[in-house]
């Protein structure tokens, strides 16, 4: 999404396929640089404002640490720490912050709120999560899949400023098992951008929104939708799940636990995909959507996936601000 000459990142398909590949290449290069102990202060002297209406572990720490590693600075802005919590209109907060910082990352409830921030901002706005979308998680997911399926090695010559290259996703099949939540919706579109063969298995009534499926199909993808987790998992390269009860849904717990029976990612399900890696965006409710033995197994790439939030977001920020 753009506002004048400013690029925002509110949805994963705010990036074109080529731009997405550029960001992933840069993320891989930043990861190698960090592992080699090489400094990369590409955003020296720049400041990221971080608005949080929801609690966070990975989003806050990865963005704050990422800005430090890029030579910049991050400012945490809890809803009760700024005038937003006292009734200031979002458009006023956005226009004011634009005069102080170089970019804003916001983690809010309503997706329309991130859109208002972007409409009135003169600096890039990054969606750190809304009820409808989590595109930063999708960036990390795609980086993780590319590493698992060999694409990372193919790009070993890329530099942080490098351009797009072959995707590395050809022929990769992913099974999403569980709730068609904000993470699933962003991933569905991200899979379409990268030609990943996606099957989504949810209980009836918990599927991906029709408009999200339409966006994916508009990109040339044809995600398979099913209510059978075994069908989705069979011979998949990656099995991906998330919590059944997201923030704000706690009062639905009893109903959801009943409705999601049979959708747990467990050792029995993995027998249908003997070569699959397992992903989870965290936090995990062990014993509900995923068993402890699976998340701790050598097939789990869950913590590589969590680490990749850092590298992917650094790449996104430097790309937006360059």
Image: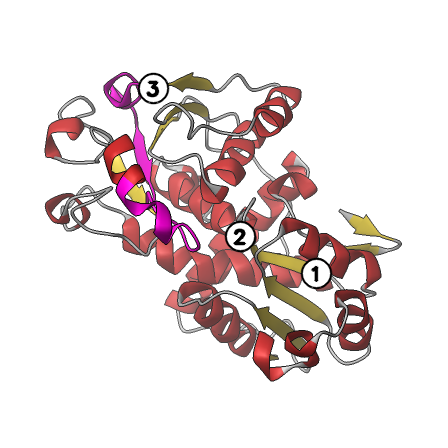
177 lies left or right of 155: left
Residue at image location 31% in from the left, 43% down from the top: 279
Q: Is residue 160 visible?
A: no
Q: Position of residue 248 (x, y in %)?
A: 44, 54
Under circle 1, the secondary element is strand
Distance, label 3 to label 2, CA atoms, is: 27 Å
Local crowd size for mark 1, using a 10 Å CA cut-off: few (<14), some (14–19), many (≥20): many
- Comparing labels 3 and 1, the label whose residue is closer to the camera: 3
Q: Position of residue 22 (x, y in %)?
A: 61, 46
The answer to which image quadrant residue 76 occupies is: bottom right
Q: Position of residue 202 (x, y in %)?
A: 36, 27
Examine the rendered structure and indicate whether residue 127 appears above or below residue 287.
below
First in residue order: circle 3 vs circle 1: 1
- Comparing labels 3 and 2, the label whose residue is closer to the camera: 3
Under circle 2, the secondary element is helix
The answer to which image quadrant residue 99 occupies is: bottom right
Residue at image location 10% in from the left, 46% down from the top: 293
Give the residue at mark 3: 227
Question: Which sits in the foreground, 277 or 263?
Answer: 263
Mark 2 near mark 1, Cβ–Cβ under 8 Å? no
Q: Which residues are magenta?
A: 228-254
The answer to which image quadrant residue 58 occupies is: bottom left
Give the residue at mark 2: 136
């Amino acid at each position: 999404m753009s506002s004048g000459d400013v690029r925002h990142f509110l949805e994963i398909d705010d990036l074109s396929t080529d731009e997405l590949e550029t960001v992933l290449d840069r993320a891989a290069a930043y990861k190698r640089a960090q592992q080699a102990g090489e400094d990369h202060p590409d955003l020296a002297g720049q400041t990221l404002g971080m608005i949080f209406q929801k609690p966070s572990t990975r989003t806050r720490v990865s963005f704050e640490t990422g800005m430090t590693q890029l030579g910049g600075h991050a400012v945490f802005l809890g809803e009760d720490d700024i005038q937003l919590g006292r009734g200031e209109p979002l458009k006023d907060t956005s226009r004011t912050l634009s005069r102080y910082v170089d970019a804003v990352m916001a983690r809010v409830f309503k997706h329309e709120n991130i859109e208002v921030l972007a409409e009135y901002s003169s600096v890039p706005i990054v969606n750190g999560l809304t009820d409808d979308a989590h595109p930063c998680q999708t960036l990390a997911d795609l980086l993780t899949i590319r590493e698992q399926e060999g694409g990372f090695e193919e790009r070993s010559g890329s530099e942080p400023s490098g351009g797009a290259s072959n995707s590395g996703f050809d022929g990769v099949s992913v099974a999403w098992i569980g709730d068609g939540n904000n993470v699933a919706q962003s991933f569905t579109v991200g899979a379409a951008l990268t030609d990943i063969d996606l099957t989504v298995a949810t209980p009836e009534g918990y599927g991906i929104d029709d408009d999200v499926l339409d966006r994916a199909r508009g990109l040339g993808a044809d995600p398979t939708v099913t209510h059978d987790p075994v069908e989705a998992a069979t011979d998949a390269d990656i099995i991906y799940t998330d919590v059944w009860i997201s923030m704000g849904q706690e009062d639905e717990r009893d109903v959801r636990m009943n409705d999601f029976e049979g959708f747990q990612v467990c050792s029995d399900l993995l027998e249908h995909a003997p070569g699959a890696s397992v992903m989870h965006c965290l936090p995990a409710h062990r014993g509900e959507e995923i068993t402890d033995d699976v998340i701790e197994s050598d097939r789990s790439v869950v913590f590589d996936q969590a680490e990749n939030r850092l590298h992917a977001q650094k790449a996104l920020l430097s790309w937006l601000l360059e």
